[in-house]
Structure formats: C-alpha cells, structure tokens
Amino acid sequence: MPRKILTLEELQEALQAAQADAEEVEAALQMVDADTPEEQVDELQARFSAKIDEAAHYAEAVARKEQMQEALSKVPRNANKSKDDGPRITLGKEPSTYRKGGPNSFFRDVFSVQMTSDPGALSRLTRNSQELKIEQGLDVEQYAMSTGTGGVGFVPPRYLQDEFLEFGRAGRPLADAIGSDPLPMNQGLTVNVPRITTGGAAAVQSAEAGAVADNSQVTDFVTAPISTITAKTDMSRQLFDFSTPALEGVIARDLASAYALQVDSELINGTASGGRVKGILSAASANAVPVGTVTAVGIYPKIADAIQRIDTNRYFPASLIVMHPRRWAQFLAALDSSNRPLVLPSAAAQNAMAQGGGRNASQGFVNYDLQGLPVLKDANIPTNLGAATNEDRILVARIEDYLFLESPVPVVRAYEEVLSGTLQVRVQVWGYIAFTAERAASAYSTYLLTGLTPPTF
C-alpha cells in the first residue's frame, strides 16, 4: 500500500514531535545514575539514537519541501487567475508547542512538572516560554514566579492568552473601558503616582524689570497598592488524565471569566483592606449627587448635574456614564405622558431622552449616548448599598484621570495535594493589578448618583 505524501505542515508537526521525543529521552538520560540498570540505560540510548535519526529524516524532508515551494513560488502565476485564488504560504514556521487542537496539553504538562518532575513536560513548557519570548518579546521569567509559597507558575501559550482576552472582556467592561498599562514587576508591592496638588499661577508683572511672581506647583504622590487576583477550577483526576487538549479551552474560558469579573469588581468595589485595591466607590475623590425622585425622568437632570460639576471643577470633560443593567433597563422602560418610550432606537423620533441604536448587549457599551456621553452597563455595580442595602449607583466619571496597571498575562499552576482525598486536580491562575481613582488631586473626576432604590417596571 503506497505511503501518504505529507504536506509541509504535516512534516513540520512530525519533525516537532520527533524533536520533542528526543528531548524527552535525553532528559531521562540526564537522570541516569550509578543505580540505574545497564539494560535500561542501553534501551534509553537506543531510543535516543532512533529519535535523532527520525528527526533528521523529517528535517531533511521539510527542507526539501520548503525548497520546492520556494522554487514554485517564483513561477509566474496565470494571468487569468485572481491574486486571491489560493492561500499564501509562510515558509519556515514550525507549529507552536501548544496550539488549539494540537497533541500537547499545557495544563497537563504544568501538573506533570509540579507533581512528578516529568522531564518531557518541562522541555515542552521551556520551549513554550522561548516561543513567547520570540513572538512577543516578553521576559517570561519576570512574572513566572510567586512571591509566596507553592511553587512556580507558567505563562499560558499564545492561543490560551487569546482565550483569556476574548472571553474576559465580557466580564470586565469598566476595566476595559478605562484601559490598563503594564504593571512594573519586581518594584515592590505598591505604586507611587506623583501628582500636582496646587498648580502654578501666572501674574502680571508690576512694572518693567519688576519682580516675577513665584507661584511654583505643590506636589505629592498617591499610593496604589498591588493586589493579587486569583481564580481556580477543580476537576476530577479522570477528566484531567483522559480528556483531549480541547478541554483547555473550556478551562481557560472558565478561569478567564472568573478572573476578569474579579478584576472589574475590584476597580469598582475594592476596599483598600485585606490585600485589595481602593476601588472607585471607596475613593476619597468620589462625590455624591443625591437623587430625590428615583425615576428615569428624575434621574436624568441629576446626571446633567454630575456632568457640569466635572466641567466646572475639574476643567476637563466627563467621559463615561456607568450603571447597573437594572438601572439602564429603567431608562429603556421609561414612557412619556402619552406612553411613548423615551429611549428610542434612532434619533428620528421625537422626545428622545437618549439617542442611538444597535444591539442592546447584556454588558458593556449599550450603543446609546446619554447627554453626549457613552453609557456602559456593568453588573459589578453593587445593588446592596444604602441604609436599606438595596441601592445601586450611577457613575459619571472622567476615566482618563484613573490609573490602572496590570500584569501582562495571568500565570498558571496545577496541583492535587489539597484535593487528594477526592482524587481531584486544581488548576489556578493569578495576576496582579494596581489601581487608583485618586490621581487627580482636585477630587472632581468621579460623581456617584446615590439613593437609587430598585426600579419598578
């Protein structure tokens, strides 16, 4: 029976698998000592030689295939064909160690290294770190270690980082609206942010050659503590051992959702105690705007009041309105005296309290402008505030004044000790954030509408 002719990608995958096998056997040979039986050493050396020969065979085949494709690429294309008739081939790029649908499991290798010191798994994780450095220019080691106990964590491969980013955005609408900068690593557990508390002033010179007024700025700094955000998933050892690498997408989505939700919640609700950042609701710069009549029509002028207070006192415009989904639903349900909705799908109709259109997402921007500002729905706005523990808040803010720093990607570890009694494995991620809503010393960047009891429909 004739052998299958392999494509370039298949040859590259076979080469990578042979190289990985050779590295695994070589790592086992490094662990040989005087007590290792001679026949076991001979077997390892024979396997190593066979894998080296196999890798050399595939490397030669890859080189031939690339040489052939390079030669074919120089042949003029048929003038009658479109430029987009076929895919363009990128030459010389080997498949990543960990990839969606690939043969290797990142989470399983993390577990194997930490539990059994598996040399093959360690080799693959090391190669993944090298790939990340090449692709992203990351110094992986700078945030691959924990300052506490519990061992080393590993940075997820690129496709799992994409899972975190893609899935995480839905759980952190305000955090993504603010936007983050890279958190400086290994610089202590607080970030000191300089600010001007009293600005300099100009003055009219009293006469020619008269003294110039000295009105220098007064400065200080605000301290933003670094918080550790963690998330975990527990699963049976059987599921962990026998599932395909496709399970990684499920694990990543679950962890990313929990991680992203906690990041966003800390920016809003952090209390500056117990290792938490000081969130917006706890910031000294949060100014209250009491709402008397808790209807859409009663709330509307209070939003205008908050906006003008930022304009008047901060001398910069507000940039965002944030509210809980239940509060935005109150606006959507609002009717005028003729039972016509006040929030309309387009600006063509009359009496529009808000204008816009498009899909009304469960979280994030609602595709409407309210008094010229975008509206963001965020379910992390609490609904248990106030004396009766049933109030939410509407945030009107100039988010450009906030400072949000976070580590580039969360790191991962896996262990079974704490769940050994039920034969389960725990996969955990952690990362770091620093945040302050108090960078603007004038304290006029944030206004919170208070007294918002549950809406009725």
Image: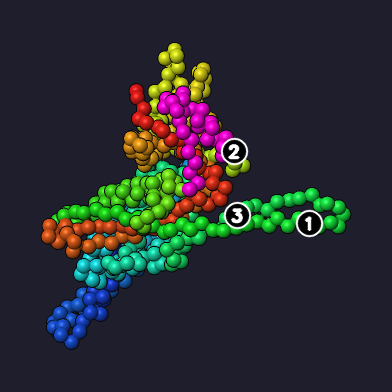
Q: Which residue is mark 3?
A: 196
Q: Which residue is mark 2?
A: 311
Residue at image point 30% right, 54% down: 231
Q: Of callouts 3 and 2, which one flags the residue occurring earlier in the amino acid sequence?
A: 3
Image vertical order of residue 285 relative to residue 31, above or below: above
Q: Quadrant of residue 412?
A: bottom left
40 and 141: which is toward the camera: 141
Dots 2, 1 in contact, CB < 8 A: no
Residue at image point 51% right, 56% down: 222
311 falls in the magenta region: yes
Density class for disc 3 (Cα within 10 Å; few <14, some 14-19, many ≥20) is some
Residue at image point 56% right, 39% down: 310
Q: How is the protein colored in the picture?
A: rainbow
Q: Is residue 147 left or right of residue 307?
A: left
User: Magenta stretch?
Assistant: 284-312
Image vertical order of residue 137 relative to residue 287, above or below: below
Q: Position of residue 12 (x, y in %)?
A: 33, 62
